[in-house]
């Protein structure tokens, strides 16, 4: 692993940066096609009920109106549920949240479509809506679906009763986390273009092109092979463009077929917030048995999630949170129940971390409460229990290599001068200061529950002029995938990175590579690149040997040059042309899938994920005694990512993820009025601005993963996972009150300082 | 572009990126829509549509404005620069280059607005310190980067 590469491990600039700094990058919102028309959804404005009548006449009298499409216009199946099939494309006849789409209006202009959609008049028979997890659990009838439980996952290892019996102390606590809106800056959008063969082409801001292909084919009742989905540059997603684009694209596709014209659909911001998914709110109960020396002996953990009106990705969130419930620690006896409940709120689904940030908020707050009970320093308590090579996880999976959890803890401890800051606060008359730590782990890729989708490909094609096209199937939503893919491919092929163009993900170019989620891009695409390069290597070397009159073993391709026995003899351009005129195959499909995982889903025991990324954050905060405002002065963020392919890009992930974590911990708060989002834009939903953020120091822990490409593991999601817990721990330290619910709004903090309870 | 009938219109004359533009526009048309839909200057983006995010920033008579909050008719007789006009015919501005060198760009949707605000900060103050940069960019939301690398780029072009 110590080999020096030309690109891998270097902070090379982004390959797509010039278009972005000049405004030339064309996002889906920037596309205008000839004869293009516009579609816009109309949706339920009650949280729960049954449609009794739809009157489109006020909309139909608008200038530019072309038509309305609803459930009865669907030629295929009215179903877009991504895992559980509980979600119609158009509500019929039940509506389950404010924002449940009932149909679309199609019009000549965008403003006409939006205006007309507001004029469609729906009559309902209203039912009693359910908004909270507790009300959903308690309901005995009038369920939102067949039952109010969307899904459940569990872990049962050892015997918690024996563990509790052996414990010196048993400590219980409850925690709560709130909704979070992705607030990707580019809204949801797509364009559907009808094709002569009865098929359709979709362009859009889409994380998962193969999900869209499946959904569109299903709704239109046509084969997947005639549905082509092409990803446009994505202006931020964070999970919010995993499943939602399937809805938009299927609706636009219906209109495109009906009117035989290109159809564009872009949500305005308020609708984007009301209609699309969010981060699941959790309520969490912990009961933990520990020895006086600080060893974890038993844990009983209950995680409950507000799924909103449909399951969408609740199964993933529920699975992942159950696996990560006790964090990166050794725990011999554990029982976890993680359950998602339907409510009549907007759906909650994929959001950076898939339930891990919530689970981490629970276990890391709990670790601090335990430390407080036992009078042990929080860092020491974590080090007594942290997973090390050879240990078993909470699902009894033996960890062998690339287990950097301990090093992430010790490195943030040292870099933050933890001991002195923890013991010597710098309180003054105005501010209370505090420092808090949170450790986490994150199973890479889809894990045992999603293993069937966990393969991915790339297609590498060498052109006669020596340029190289690389097609992949996942997504660059801003994180820099295009750049790291270019770096990996250039080093794998021994060529200059400028030869390589990474093509827009397109369902026609690469076989179904699963979703562009779960921090799986570098691992999956990187390994597929290695496979493709390994398949191309004998072709290139044989041709070079033939061209240079030698044998393939003596050929080396490096730095764009062809060497024979380490002597430079030719270059890649000449070789590419030689390949072409020799009628050689010049492309290869590379493929990689996650190794088979042995896992018992009933007990929640076994290999839950093939490897884990580890992260520990320390937050240093100041709390204003007078206003309750919390300032995060600094975060130290240590990440075991196996190997950093592009260190500066990786730092950018950590800085951005951490900042999203600060928002979730402090200011991002959802308010509803009977299911209607009141905080539906930036004046009421407060994102961190440049004036709000303190310093972030990234510490890279490189503990190579043998199954990762060049040792790499995922970073996108780990970046956000421990931040909020670290901040809550720091605030708790500063004010001397355990703060178990986020966001830590000034009201909540001030009440805690002044001894008022909620 | 197809307009709804019977709307009030205005004969607009405005200089955009050094070029004088004359168009008849509906009086309710926002400057942002005029730039994007009519002129296809799509560097300015609509994100919040209510003046909070700064993604639609353009420079109007030497001041940054949110083009979603300004009617096209209000731009009558003014001089407007968009990201397309700030970008040199060849190459990049020092600031654009600094955004690349300092890894300040992720998804890119906020970046045109961010760069125009940053150009304005540097125009108003030759050697802005970190606090000045923060004040100047506080109206531009980025959801990806956490801002650190943006600050690095704008503080004296990343020097």
Image (spheres, grey):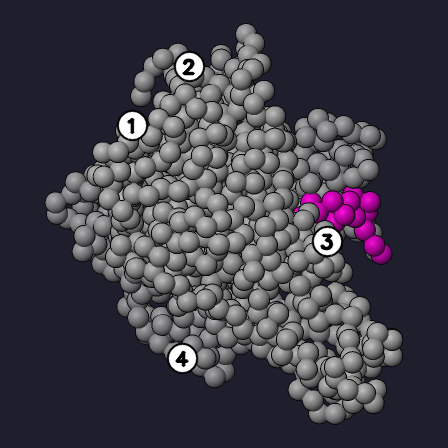
User: Is residue A60 shown left or right of residue A144?
Assistant: right
Q: Is residue A554 left or right of residue A312?
A: right
Is the residue marked by circle 2 packed among few (<14), some (14-19), or many (20+) residues within 10 Å?
many
Residue tagged 2: A753
What residue sits 54% from the left and 52% below the top? A402
User: Label 2 vs label 1: CA separation?
Assistant: 31 Å
Is residue B101 shown in magenta?
yes
Label 1 chain ID:
A
Residue A748: name its quadrant: top left
Left or right: A268 as drawn, with respect to A1:
left
Range drawn in magenta: B90-105
Q: Where is A167 relative to A708, above or below? A: above
Q: Which residue is mark 1?
A: A168
From the image, tell me which residue sits under label 4.
Answer: A223
Q: Nearer the viewer, mark 2 or mark 1?
A: 1
> Image point 63% across, 39% down: which residue?
A698
Label 3 vs label 1, nearer the camera: 1
Residue furthest top as drawn: A429
């Amino acid at each position: 692993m110590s080999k020096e590469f030309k690109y891998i491990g270097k902070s090379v600039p982004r390959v797509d940066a010039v278009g972005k700094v000049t405004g030339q990058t064309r996002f889906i919102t920037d596309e205008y096609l000839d004869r293009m028309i516009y579609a816009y959804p109309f949706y339920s404005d009650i949280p729960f009920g049954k449609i009794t009548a739809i009157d489109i006449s006020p909309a139909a009298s608008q200038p530019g109106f072309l038509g309305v499409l609803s459930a009865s216009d669907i030629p295929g199946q009215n179903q877009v549920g991504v895992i559980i099939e509980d979600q119609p494309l158009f509500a019929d006849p039940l509506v389950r949240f404010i924002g449940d789409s009932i149909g679309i209006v199609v019009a000549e202009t965008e403003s006409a479509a939006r205006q007309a959609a507001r004029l469609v008049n729906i009559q309902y028979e209203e039912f009693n809506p359910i908004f909270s997890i507790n009300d959903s659990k308690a309901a005995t009838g009038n369920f939102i679906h067949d039952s109010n439980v969307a899904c459940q996952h569990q872990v049962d290892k050892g015997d918690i009763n024996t563990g509790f019996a052996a414990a010196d102390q048993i400590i219980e606590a409850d925690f709560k986390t709130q909704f979070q809106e992705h607030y990707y800056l580019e809204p949801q959008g797509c364009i559907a273009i009808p094709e002569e063969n009865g098929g359709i082409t979709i362009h859009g801001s889409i994380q998962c092109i193969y999900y869209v292909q499946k959904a569109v084919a299903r709704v239109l009742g046509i084969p997947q092979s005639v549905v082509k989905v092409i990803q446009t540059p994505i202006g931020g997603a964070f999970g919010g463009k995993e499943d939602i684009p399937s809805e938009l694209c299927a609706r636009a596709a219906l209109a495109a077929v009906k009117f035989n014209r290109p159809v564009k659909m872009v949500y305005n911001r308020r609708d984007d917030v009301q209609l699309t998914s969010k981060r699941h709110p959790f309520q969490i109960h912990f009961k933990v048995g520990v020895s006086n020396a600080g060893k974890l002996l038993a844990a009983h953990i209950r995680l409950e999630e507000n799924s909103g009106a449909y399951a969408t990705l609740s199964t993933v969130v529920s699975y992942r949170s159950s696996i990560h419930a006790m964090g990166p620690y050794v725990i011999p006896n554990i029982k976890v129940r993680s359950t998602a409940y339907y409510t009549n709120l907007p759906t909650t689904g994929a959001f950076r971390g898939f339930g891990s940030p919530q689970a981490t908020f629970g276990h890391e707050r709990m670790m601090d409460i335990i430390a407080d009970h036992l009078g042990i320093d929080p860092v020491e308590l974590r080090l007594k229990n942290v997973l090390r090579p050879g240990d078993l996880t909470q699902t009894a999976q033996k960890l062998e290599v690339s287990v950097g959890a301990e090093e992430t803890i010790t490195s943030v401890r040292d870099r933050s001068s933890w001991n002195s800051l923890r013991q010597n606060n710098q309180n003054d008359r105005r501010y209370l200061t505090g420092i808090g730590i949170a450790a986490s782990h994150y199973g890479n890729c889809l894990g045992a529950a999603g293993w069937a989708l966990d393969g991915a490909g790339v297609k590498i094609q060498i052109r006669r002029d020596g340029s190289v096209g690389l097609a992949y199937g996942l997504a660059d939503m801003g994180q820099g995938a295009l750049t790291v893919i270019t770096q990996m491919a250039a080093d794998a092929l021994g060529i200059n990175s400028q030869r390589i163009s990474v093509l827009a993900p397109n369902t026609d170019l690469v076989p179904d590579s699963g979703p562009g989620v779960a921090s799986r891009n570098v691992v999956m695409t990187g390994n597929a690149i290695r496979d493709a390069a390994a398949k191309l290597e004998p072709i290139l070397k044989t041709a070079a040997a033939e061209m240079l009159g030698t044998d393939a073993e003596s050929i080396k391709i490096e730095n764009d040059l062809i060497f024979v026995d380490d002597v430079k003899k030719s270059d890649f351009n000449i070789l590419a042309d030689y390949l072409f005129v020799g009628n050689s195959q010049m492309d290869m499909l590379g493929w990689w899938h996650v190794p088979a995982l042995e896992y018992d889903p009933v007990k929640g025991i076994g290999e839950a994920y093939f490897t884990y990324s580890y992260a520990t954050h320390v937050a240093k905060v100041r709390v204003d005694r007078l206003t309750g405002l919390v300032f995060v002065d600094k975060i130290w963020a240590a990440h075991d990512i196996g190997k950093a392919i592009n260190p500066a890009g990786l730092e950018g992930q950590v800085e951005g993820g951490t900042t999203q974590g600060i928002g979730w911990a402090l200011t991002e708060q959802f308010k509803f009025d009977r299911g209607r989002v009141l905080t539906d834009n930036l004046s009421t939903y407060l994102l961190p601005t440049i004036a709000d953020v303190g310093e972030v120091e990234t510490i890279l822990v490189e503990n190579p993963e043998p199954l990762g490409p060049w040792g790499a593991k995922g970073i996108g999601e780990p970046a956000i996972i421990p931040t909020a817990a670290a901040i809550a721990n720091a605030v708790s330290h500063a004010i001397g009150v355990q703060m178990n619910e986020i966001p830590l709004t000034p009201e909540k903090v001030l009440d805690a300082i002044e001894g008022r309870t909620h | 572009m197809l307009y709804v009938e019977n709307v009030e219109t205005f004969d607009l004359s405005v200089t955009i990126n050094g070029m004088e533009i004359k168009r008849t526009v509906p009086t309710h048309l926002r400057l942002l829509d005029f730039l994007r839909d009519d002129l296809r200057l799509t560097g300015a983006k609509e994100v919040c549509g209510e003046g909070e995010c700064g993604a639609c920033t353009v420079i109007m008579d030497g001041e940054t404005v949110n083009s979603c909050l300004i009617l096209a008719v209000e731009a009558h007789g003014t001089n407007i620069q968009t990201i397309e006009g700030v970008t040199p015919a060849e190459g990049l501005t020092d600031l654009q280059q600094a955004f690349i060198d300092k890894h300040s760009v992720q998804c890119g949707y906020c970046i045109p607005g961010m760069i125009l605000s940053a150009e304005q900060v540097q125009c108003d103050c030759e050697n802005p310190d970190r606090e000045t940069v923060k004040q100047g960019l506080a109206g531009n939301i980025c959801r990806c980067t956490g801002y650190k690398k943006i600050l690095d780029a704008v503080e004296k072009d990343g020097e």
